[in-house]
Amino acid sequence: MMNTKRLAVLGLVLAALLAVLWGLVIDHPTDKGVTPPNVPLPVSPLSGEFFVDSQVTLRWDYLPDLAPRQTFAVQIWYEDEALRENWTNERQFDAQASIDSYEQEIGAFSWQVAVINLAETGGFESMGSAWSPVQTVERVRRIRPMPIPEAQRSAAARLVMTQEYASTSEMITRVRHFINSNSDDETQDTFAADYHDALDMIAAHSNGQGPSPRLLCDGQATAMLTLLGELGIESRLIFLYGDNIDQIYEHTLLEVFNPSTQHWELHDVLSDVSFADENGNPTSIERMVFGVLDTVSVCDKDGECALFPEADYNYKIHFEAFRYGYTDTFWVNPDRFDLTKRFPSNDNKNLAEYLTGNPRDFVFRLDNWAVEP
Protein backbone atom coordinates (compact mmCIF):
# COMPACT_ATOMS: atom_id res chain seq x y z
CA MET A 1 0.00 0.00 0.00
CA MET A 2 2.82 2.37 0.96
CA ASN A 3 4.67 1.64 -2.27
CA THR A 4 1.54 2.40 -4.32
CA LYS A 5 1.11 5.78 -2.57
CA ARG A 6 4.78 6.64 -3.09
CA LEU A 7 4.53 5.80 -6.78
CA ALA A 8 1.44 7.97 -7.10
CA VAL A 9 3.20 10.93 -5.44
CA LEU A 10 6.26 10.47 -7.64
CA GLY A 11 4.02 10.40 -10.68
CA LEU A 12 2.40 13.67 -9.68
CA VAL A 13 5.82 15.27 -9.10
CA LEU A 14 7.08 14.10 -12.49
CA ALA A 15 3.95 15.40 -14.18
CA ALA A 16 4.41 18.77 -12.50
CA LEU A 17 8.06 18.92 -13.59
CA LEU A 18 7.11 18.07 -17.17
CA ALA A 19 4.50 20.82 -17.14
CA VAL A 20 7.08 23.34 -15.91
CA LEU A 21 9.58 22.26 -18.56
CA TRP A 22 6.91 22.48 -21.26
CA GLY A 23 6.09 25.99 -20.08
CA LEU A 24 9.76 26.97 -20.30
CA VAL A 25 9.92 25.67 -23.86
CA ILE A 26 6.86 27.71 -24.78
CA ASP A 27 8.21 30.86 -23.09
CA HIS A 28 11.68 30.46 -24.67
CA PRO A 29 11.16 29.22 -28.23
CA THR A 30 13.99 28.06 -30.41
CA ASP A 31 15.65 30.41 -32.91
CA LYS A 32 13.24 29.21 -35.58
CA GLY A 33 10.29 30.49 -33.60
CA VAL A 34 11.65 33.68 -32.04
CA THR A 35 9.03 36.33 -31.55
CA PRO A 36 10.01 39.31 -33.75
CA PRO A 37 11.30 42.35 -31.83
CA ASN A 38 8.95 45.33 -31.56
CA VAL A 39 11.81 47.72 -32.32
CA PRO A 40 14.30 47.92 -35.22
CA LEU A 41 17.79 46.75 -34.26
CA PRO A 42 20.71 48.86 -35.60
CA VAL A 43 23.34 46.87 -37.51
CA SER A 44 25.82 49.51 -38.71
CA PRO A 45 27.40 51.82 -37.95
CA LEU A 46 27.23 51.18 -34.22
CA SER A 47 28.20 53.36 -31.28
CA GLY A 48 31.95 53.77 -30.91
CA GLU A 49 32.71 53.43 -34.61
CA PHE A 50 34.43 56.11 -36.73
CA PHE A 51 33.89 57.39 -40.25
CA VAL A 52 35.68 59.88 -42.51
CA ASP A 53 33.62 60.41 -45.67
CA SER A 54 29.94 61.29 -45.41
CA GLN A 55 28.97 58.41 -47.71
CA VAL A 56 27.51 56.44 -44.82
CA THR A 57 24.69 53.90 -45.14
CA LEU A 58 22.68 53.20 -42.00
CA ARG A 59 21.43 49.60 -41.69
CA TRP A 60 19.07 47.87 -39.26
CA ASP A 61 17.17 44.61 -38.78
CA TYR A 62 13.42 44.30 -38.34
CA LEU A 63 12.05 40.80 -38.70
CA PRO A 64 8.35 41.28 -39.56
CA ASP A 65 7.34 42.79 -42.84
CA LEU A 66 6.02 46.30 -42.65
CA ALA A 67 2.23 46.37 -42.56
CA PRO A 68 0.29 48.42 -45.07
CA ARG A 69 0.62 52.12 -44.25
CA GLN A 70 3.79 51.55 -42.24
CA THR A 71 7.30 52.84 -42.92
CA PHE A 72 10.61 53.41 -41.13
CA ALA A 73 11.46 56.82 -39.72
CA VAL A 74 15.21 57.52 -39.47
CA GLN A 75 16.49 60.35 -37.30
CA ILE A 76 20.03 61.74 -37.63
CA TRP A 77 21.54 64.60 -35.65
CA TYR A 78 24.90 66.26 -34.96
CA GLU A 79 25.68 66.79 -31.27
CA ASP A 80 23.02 69.17 -29.89
CA GLU A 81 21.77 70.52 -33.22
CA ALA A 82 18.29 69.97 -34.66
CA LEU A 83 17.71 66.47 -36.02
CA ARG A 84 16.96 65.44 -39.60
CA GLU A 85 14.16 62.88 -40.10
CA ASN A 86 13.64 60.81 -43.23
CA TRP A 87 11.21 58.00 -44.09
CA THR A 88 12.00 54.86 -46.05
CA ASN A 89 10.51 51.42 -46.69
CA GLU A 90 13.98 49.88 -46.93
CA ARG A 91 16.00 48.48 -44.04
CA GLN A 92 18.80 50.90 -44.83
CA PHE A 93 19.22 54.60 -45.51
CA ASP A 94 21.84 56.68 -47.36
CA ALA A 95 22.76 59.31 -44.75
CA GLN A 96 25.14 61.40 -46.89
CA ALA A 97 22.77 64.31 -47.56
CA SER A 98 21.74 64.51 -43.91
CA ILE A 99 25.36 64.43 -42.70
CA ASP A 100 26.47 67.02 -45.26
CA SER A 101 23.66 69.35 -44.23
CA TYR A 102 25.45 70.03 -40.92
CA GLU A 103 28.70 71.09 -42.66
CA GLN A 104 30.79 69.49 -39.91
CA GLU A 105 34.07 67.69 -40.69
CA ILE A 106 34.52 66.24 -37.22
CA GLY A 107 32.31 65.47 -34.25
CA ALA A 108 29.62 63.13 -32.95
CA PHE A 109 26.69 62.09 -35.15
CA SER A 110 23.81 60.05 -33.72
CA TRP A 111 21.01 58.06 -35.31
CA GLN A 112 17.98 55.96 -34.42
CA VAL A 113 15.12 54.32 -36.31
CA ALA A 114 11.51 53.36 -35.57
CA VAL A 115 8.43 52.07 -37.36
CA ILE A 116 5.64 54.60 -37.81
CA ASN A 117 2.02 54.22 -38.88
CA LEU A 118 0.83 56.48 -41.68
CA ALA A 119 -2.53 58.16 -41.99
CA GLU A 120 -4.59 57.71 -45.15
CA THR A 121 -3.25 61.07 -46.31
CA GLY A 122 0.32 59.73 -46.08
CA GLY A 123 1.30 61.76 -43.03
CA PHE A 124 2.27 60.58 -39.57
CA GLU A 125 -0.51 58.93 -37.58
CA SER A 126 1.12 57.02 -34.70
CA MET A 127 4.19 55.08 -33.64
CA GLY A 128 4.39 51.52 -34.93
CA SER A 129 7.30 50.64 -32.64
CA ALA A 130 9.56 52.11 -30.02
CA TRP A 131 12.69 53.94 -31.15
CA SER A 132 15.79 51.81 -31.54
CA PRO A 133 18.73 52.37 -29.18
CA VAL A 134 20.60 55.55 -30.16
CA GLN A 135 23.88 54.92 -31.99
CA THR A 136 26.56 57.62 -31.74
CA VAL A 137 29.48 57.52 -34.17
CA GLU A 138 32.41 59.90 -34.54
CA ARG A 139 33.32 61.69 -37.74
CA VAL A 140 37.08 62.20 -38.07
CA ARG A 141 39.37 63.54 -40.77
CA ARG A 142 41.62 60.52 -40.65
CA ILE A 143 41.30 57.17 -38.90
CA ARG A 144 43.99 56.74 -36.26
CA PRO A 145 46.40 53.85 -37.01
CA MET A 146 46.39 51.03 -34.49
CA PRO A 147 49.29 51.09 -32.00
CA ILE A 148 51.50 48.02 -32.04
CA PRO A 149 50.97 45.48 -29.22
CA GLU A 150 52.67 46.44 -25.98
CA ALA A 151 54.94 43.39 -26.01
CA GLN A 152 56.37 44.51 -29.38
CA ARG A 153 57.04 48.12 -28.43
CA SER A 154 60.55 49.49 -28.15
CA ALA A 155 62.06 50.51 -24.83
CA ALA A 156 61.51 54.14 -25.85
CA ALA A 157 57.79 53.57 -26.50
CA ARG A 158 57.39 51.75 -23.19
CA LEU A 159 59.06 54.66 -21.39
CA VAL A 160 56.67 57.12 -23.02
CA MET A 161 53.62 55.05 -22.10
CA THR A 162 54.60 54.82 -18.42
CA GLN A 163 54.03 58.57 -18.07
CA GLU A 164 50.74 60.36 -17.49
CA TYR A 165 49.59 63.16 -19.80
CA ALA A 166 46.83 65.71 -19.56
CA SER A 167 46.16 65.42 -23.30
CA THR A 168 47.41 63.88 -26.52
CA SER A 169 48.95 67.26 -27.39
CA GLU A 170 51.03 67.16 -24.22
CA MET A 171 52.19 63.62 -24.99
CA ILE A 172 53.32 64.62 -28.49
CA THR A 173 55.24 67.60 -27.09
CA ARG A 174 56.93 65.46 -24.46
CA VAL A 175 57.88 62.82 -27.03
CA ARG A 176 59.55 65.58 -29.05
CA HIS A 177 61.45 66.82 -25.99
CA PHE A 178 62.38 63.24 -25.03
CA ILE A 179 64.11 62.72 -28.37
CA ASN A 180 65.69 66.18 -28.48
CA SER A 181 67.07 66.09 -24.94
CA ASN A 182 68.61 62.64 -25.38
CA SER A 183 70.31 63.32 -28.73
CA ASP A 184 73.63 64.91 -29.66
CA ASP A 185 73.04 67.29 -32.59
CA GLU A 186 76.66 68.15 -33.45
CA THR A 187 76.75 65.60 -36.28
CA GLN A 188 74.95 62.46 -37.40
CA ASP A 189 76.03 58.83 -37.31
CA THR A 190 74.68 56.01 -39.46
CA PHE A 191 71.54 54.27 -38.26
CA ALA A 192 68.76 52.06 -39.62
CA ALA A 193 66.35 53.72 -42.03
CA ASP A 194 63.64 54.05 -39.35
CA TYR A 195 66.15 54.96 -36.61
CA HIS A 196 64.86 52.28 -34.27
CA ASP A 197 68.43 51.64 -33.12
CA ALA A 198 68.82 55.34 -32.34
CA LEU A 199 65.61 55.12 -30.29
CA ASP A 200 67.14 52.28 -28.26
CA MET A 201 70.13 54.52 -27.51
CA ILE A 202 67.81 57.40 -26.58
CA ALA A 203 65.92 55.18 -24.13
CA ALA A 204 69.13 53.86 -22.60
CA HIS A 205 70.65 57.34 -22.31
CA SER A 206 67.53 58.69 -20.61
CA ASN A 207 68.12 56.04 -17.92
CA GLY A 208 71.82 56.90 -17.63
CA GLN A 209 72.90 53.73 -19.43
CA GLY A 210 74.96 54.83 -22.41
CA PRO A 211 75.80 57.67 -24.77
CA SER A 212 73.18 59.64 -26.66
CA PRO A 213 72.94 59.04 -30.43
CA ARG A 214 74.32 61.73 -32.70
CA LEU A 215 71.35 62.96 -34.74
CA LEU A 216 70.74 66.02 -36.87
CA CYS A 217 67.32 67.31 -37.96
CA ASP A 218 66.50 64.43 -40.30
CA GLY A 219 67.53 61.79 -37.76
CA GLN A 220 65.62 63.33 -34.88
CA ALA A 221 62.48 63.86 -36.97
CA THR A 222 62.56 60.28 -38.29
CA ALA A 223 63.13 58.88 -34.80
CA MET A 224 60.07 60.76 -33.58
CA LEU A 225 58.05 59.51 -36.57
CA THR A 226 58.97 55.91 -35.72
CA LEU A 227 58.21 56.34 -32.02
CA LEU A 228 54.81 57.95 -32.63
CA GLY A 229 54.00 55.19 -35.10
CA GLU A 230 54.44 52.63 -32.33
CA LEU A 231 51.88 54.56 -30.30
CA GLY A 232 49.36 54.67 -33.16
CA ILE A 233 49.90 58.34 -34.06
CA GLU A 234 50.42 59.24 -37.72
CA SER A 235 53.13 61.69 -38.77
CA ARG A 236 55.13 62.61 -41.87
CA LEU A 237 58.51 64.13 -42.62
CA ILE A 238 58.61 67.65 -44.01
CA PHE A 239 61.64 68.63 -46.11
CA LEU A 240 61.99 72.40 -46.00
CA TYR A 241 63.92 74.69 -48.39
CA GLY A 242 64.96 78.33 -48.25
CA ASP A 243 66.96 80.88 -50.27
CA ASN A 244 70.18 81.82 -48.44
CA ILE A 245 71.64 84.24 -51.01
CA ASP A 246 74.09 81.93 -52.82
CA GLN A 247 72.95 78.62 -51.34
CA ILE A 248 69.78 76.56 -50.88
CA TYR A 249 69.17 75.94 -47.20
CA GLU A 250 67.55 72.65 -46.13
CA HIS A 251 65.91 71.55 -42.90
CA THR A 252 63.71 68.62 -41.81
CA LEU A 253 60.60 68.96 -39.65
CA LEU A 254 57.85 66.57 -38.60
CA GLU A 255 54.13 67.12 -39.11
CA VAL A 256 51.99 65.14 -36.67
CA PHE A 257 48.32 64.32 -37.10
CA ASN A 258 46.90 64.87 -33.62
CA PRO A 259 44.10 62.28 -33.24
CA SER A 260 42.39 64.37 -30.54
CA THR A 261 42.15 67.62 -32.50
CA GLN A 262 42.08 65.94 -35.94
CA HIS A 263 44.55 68.54 -37.23
CA TRP A 264 48.08 68.40 -38.59
CA GLU A 265 50.57 70.23 -36.37
CA LEU A 266 54.18 71.09 -37.21
CA HIS A 267 57.14 70.27 -34.95
CA ASP A 268 60.83 71.13 -35.23
CA VAL A 269 62.41 68.29 -33.25
CA LEU A 270 65.96 69.62 -33.58
CA SER A 271 64.91 72.98 -32.08
CA ASP A 272 62.36 71.38 -29.71
CA VAL A 273 59.61 73.82 -30.74
CA SER A 274 56.20 73.87 -32.37
CA PHE A 275 54.25 76.68 -34.03
CA ALA A 276 50.93 78.40 -33.31
CA ASP A 277 48.75 80.69 -35.42
CA GLU A 278 47.24 84.02 -34.40
CA ASN A 279 44.49 82.18 -32.49
CA GLY A 280 46.94 80.03 -30.55
CA ASN A 281 46.16 76.87 -32.52
CA PRO A 282 48.94 74.57 -33.77
CA THR A 283 49.88 75.28 -37.39
CA SER A 284 50.48 73.03 -40.36
CA ILE A 285 53.35 73.31 -42.82
CA GLU A 286 50.98 74.83 -45.40
CA ARG A 287 50.07 77.63 -43.02
CA MET A 288 53.77 78.34 -42.41
CA VAL A 289 54.84 78.42 -46.06
CA PHE A 290 51.78 79.96 -47.71
CA GLY A 291 50.45 82.17 -44.90
CA VAL A 292 51.80 85.36 -43.30
CA LEU A 293 54.56 84.51 -40.83
CA ASP A 294 54.39 87.69 -38.74
CA THR A 295 51.32 86.41 -36.89
CA VAL A 296 52.79 82.96 -36.16
CA SER A 297 54.38 82.15 -32.80
CA VAL A 298 57.23 79.76 -32.00
CA CYS A 299 56.47 77.75 -28.83
CA ASP A 300 58.83 75.76 -26.60
CA LYS A 301 58.10 72.58 -24.65
CA ASP A 302 56.63 74.54 -21.74
CA GLY A 303 54.18 76.42 -23.94
CA GLU A 304 56.10 79.68 -23.82
CA CYS A 305 55.66 81.40 -27.19
CA ALA A 306 57.19 84.33 -29.06
CA LEU A 307 56.07 85.90 -32.32
CA PHE A 308 58.00 84.57 -35.29
CA PRO A 309 59.88 87.81 -36.14
CA GLU A 310 61.23 88.16 -32.56
CA ALA A 311 61.64 84.47 -31.70
CA ASP A 312 65.06 82.99 -31.03
CA TYR A 313 64.74 80.46 -33.84
CA ASN A 314 67.49 79.51 -36.28
CA TYR A 315 65.45 78.47 -39.32
CA LYS A 316 63.29 81.49 -40.14
CA ILE A 317 64.38 81.74 -43.78
CA HIS A 318 63.56 78.10 -44.54
CA PHE A 319 59.77 78.45 -44.86
CA GLU A 320 59.73 79.07 -48.59
CA ALA A 321 59.30 75.64 -50.18
CA PHE A 322 58.71 72.08 -48.96
CA ARG A 323 57.68 68.56 -49.82
CA TYR A 324 55.95 65.82 -47.82
CA GLY A 325 58.56 63.14 -47.25
CA TYR A 326 59.95 61.36 -50.29
CA THR A 327 57.12 62.32 -52.62
CA ASP A 328 57.42 63.68 -56.16
CA THR A 329 55.55 66.94 -55.51
CA PHE A 330 57.19 70.14 -54.27
CA TRP A 331 55.20 73.06 -52.85
CA VAL A 332 56.63 76.55 -53.34
CA ASN A 333 55.64 80.06 -52.31
CA PRO A 334 56.85 81.97 -55.40
CA ASP A 335 56.81 85.27 -53.51
CA ARG A 336 59.48 83.89 -51.18
CA PHE A 337 61.49 81.58 -53.41
CA ASP A 338 62.44 82.53 -56.97
CA LEU A 339 62.39 79.29 -58.97
CA THR A 340 64.49 80.84 -61.74
CA LYS A 341 67.36 81.78 -59.43
CA ARG A 342 70.61 79.81 -59.69
CA PHE A 343 72.80 79.21 -56.64
CA PRO A 344 76.63 79.24 -56.98
CA SER A 345 77.10 76.98 -53.94
CA ASN A 346 74.75 74.40 -55.46
CA ASP A 347 76.60 73.95 -58.77
CA ASN A 348 74.76 76.97 -60.17
CA LYS A 349 71.49 75.00 -60.22
CA ASN A 350 68.03 76.36 -59.61
CA LEU A 351 65.78 74.72 -57.02
CA ALA A 352 64.15 72.27 -59.43
CA GLU A 353 67.47 71.09 -60.85
CA TYR A 354 69.08 70.82 -57.43
CA LEU A 355 66.27 68.84 -55.84
CA THR A 356 65.42 66.44 -58.63
CA GLY A 357 68.24 66.07 -61.11
CA ASN A 358 65.54 65.79 -63.77
CA PRO A 359 62.71 68.21 -62.93
CA ARG A 360 60.49 66.71 -65.65
CA ASP A 361 59.88 63.75 -63.33
CA PHE A 362 58.51 65.94 -60.55
CA VAL A 363 55.61 68.33 -59.97
CA PHE A 364 55.96 71.85 -58.58
CA ARG A 365 52.89 73.52 -57.12
CA LEU A 366 52.86 77.26 -56.39
CA ASP A 367 50.67 79.03 -53.86
CA ASN A 368 50.47 82.08 -51.62
CA TRP A 369 47.55 82.61 -49.27
CA ALA A 370 48.12 86.31 -48.67
CA VAL A 371 49.90 89.30 -50.14
CA GLU A 372 52.75 89.90 -47.73
CA PRO A 373 54.01 93.39 -46.79
Image: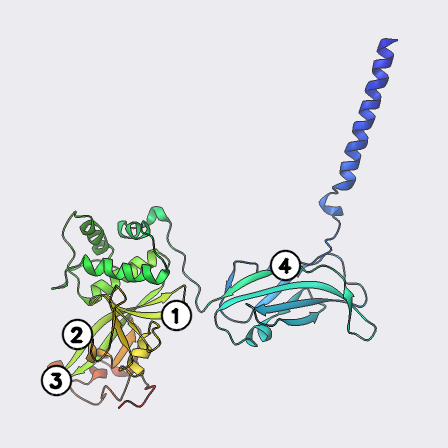
Disc 1 packing (10 Å; few <14; some 14–19; many ≥20) = some
C-beta proximity under 8 Å, tags 2 and 4? no
Question: Viewer-nearest of labels 3 and 4?
Answer: 4
Task: Residue 221 in the image: state x and y as whole percent.
Answer: 25, 65
Tell me the element at label 3. Answer: loop
Q: Earlier in the sequence, mark 2 or mark 3?
A: 3
Q: Earlier in the sequence, mark 2 or mark 4?
A: 4
Q: Which quarter of the figure has residue 262? A: bottom left
Q: How many marks?
A: 4
The amino acid sitting under disc 1 is His
The residue carrying mark 3 is 246
What residue is drawn where x is 37% and y is 58%?
232
Q: Could you say which is closer to the camera, residue 127 or residue 53?
A: 127
Question: Would residue 364 be visible to someone looking at this image?
Answer: no
Question: Would residue 300 be visible to someone looking at this image?
Answer: yes
Disc 2 packing (10 Å; few <14; some 14–19; many ≥20) = few
The residue carrying mark 2 is 314
